[in-house]
Image (cartoon, rainbow, N blue to C red):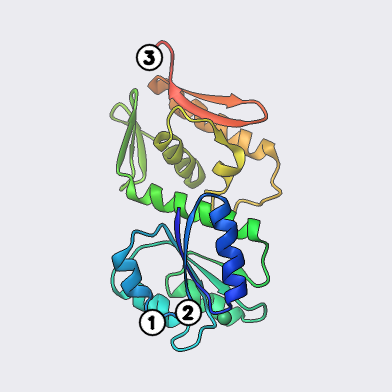
Amino acid sequence: MHVLLVEDDLPLAESVAGAMRAQGWRADISSRGEPVPASLRQDAYDVLVLDIGLPGIDGLETLRRVREQGSTLPVLMLTARDAVGDRVRGLEGGADDYLVKPFALDELLARLRALARRHELRRSQTLVLSALRFDAVARRAYVGEQPVPLSARECIVLQYMMLKTGQLLPREQLTGLIPGWEPGASDNALELLMSRLRAKVEPAGVRLRTVRGLGYLLEPAADA
Ligand code: CA
């Protein structure tokens, strides 16, 4: 992960960047918004963290300029506790998520991972596993030529699992992809979603395995 962190509170920026580097991420800090559009053109970042209150142009104007140059990079805005209007304007201006200060570092890192994963999903096109095909542009799945009816949540989960075929995917990684998933939702809710999905996709010669206590894995069926 390569992160650009735009924050004028330098002690805060350093501590956030330190936590990112401890995860093995690359983190660059900018204390102002003006250079951000040019930085994004020069370097391949995976995600942008943008404080709203900045000297010079603020985070909202920075975001506007970033989107104006056609960048689809995931953006997480940092906002002050009471600035509800800023949050709304940020999301309307094309931010993907926001976090209210003060925040827990772990929460920020988890949100950024989820944003980067969703971005990766948007970039993938057609995924194929055995007779199962997922068209990422149309957001539809097929078994052979037969469309598979999927709920919005099943669709997101299946697409990600097809992208990560053969990899054990922890529950939190999957639930983190689902917009509006309650962090406290029971494991049963995910298991229910998975069993519905399993029934729909396994006729295509794939196997959706539950690895108890760990997560889920999508692979070709042994006899496929
Ligand atoms: Ca600030």
Q: Which amino acid type is marked by label 3?
A: Ala
Rendering coords of residue 187 (x, y %): 68, 38
Disc 2 secondary structure class? helix
Residue 66, located in which quarter of the rendered image? bottom left
Hey, which residue is sitting farthest bottom in the picture?
Answer: 56
Residue 174, located in which quarter of the rendered image? top right
Q: CA distance from mark 1 to mark 3?
A: 55 Å
Please tell me which of labels 2 and 1 falls first in the chain: 1
Hey, which residue is sitting farthest top in the picture?
Answer: 223
Q: CA distance from mark 2 to mark 1?
A: 10 Å
Which residue is label 1 attached to?
Answer: 34
* Residue at the spot 50% in from the left edge and 87% down from the top edge: 55
Disc 1 secondary structure class? loop
Which marked residue is nearer to the observer: mark 2 or mark 1? Answer: 1
Location of ligand 1 given as a quarter of the image: bottom right
Label 2 near ligand 1 (CB < 8 Å): no
Which residue is label 2 attached to?
Answer: 59
Which marked residue is nearer to the observer: mark 2 or mark 3? Answer: 2
Looking at the image, residue 106 lies above or below residue 136:
below
* Residue at the spot 34% in from the left edge and 74% down from the top edge: 37
Rendering coords of residue 154 (x, y %): 49, 40
Few, some or many residues within 10 Å of mark 2 (<14, 14–19, 20+):
many
111 to the left or right of 148: right
Q: Which amino acid type is marked by label 1?
A: Glu
Rendering coords of residue 16 (x, y %): 59, 64
In the image shown, does 29 or 108 lie closer to the viewer?
29
Few, some or many residues within 10 Å of mark 1 (<14, 14–19, 20+):
some
Which residue is label 3 attached to?
Answer: 224
Are discs 1 and 3 less than 8 Å apart at CB?
no
Please tell me which of labels 2 and 3 falls first in the chain: 2
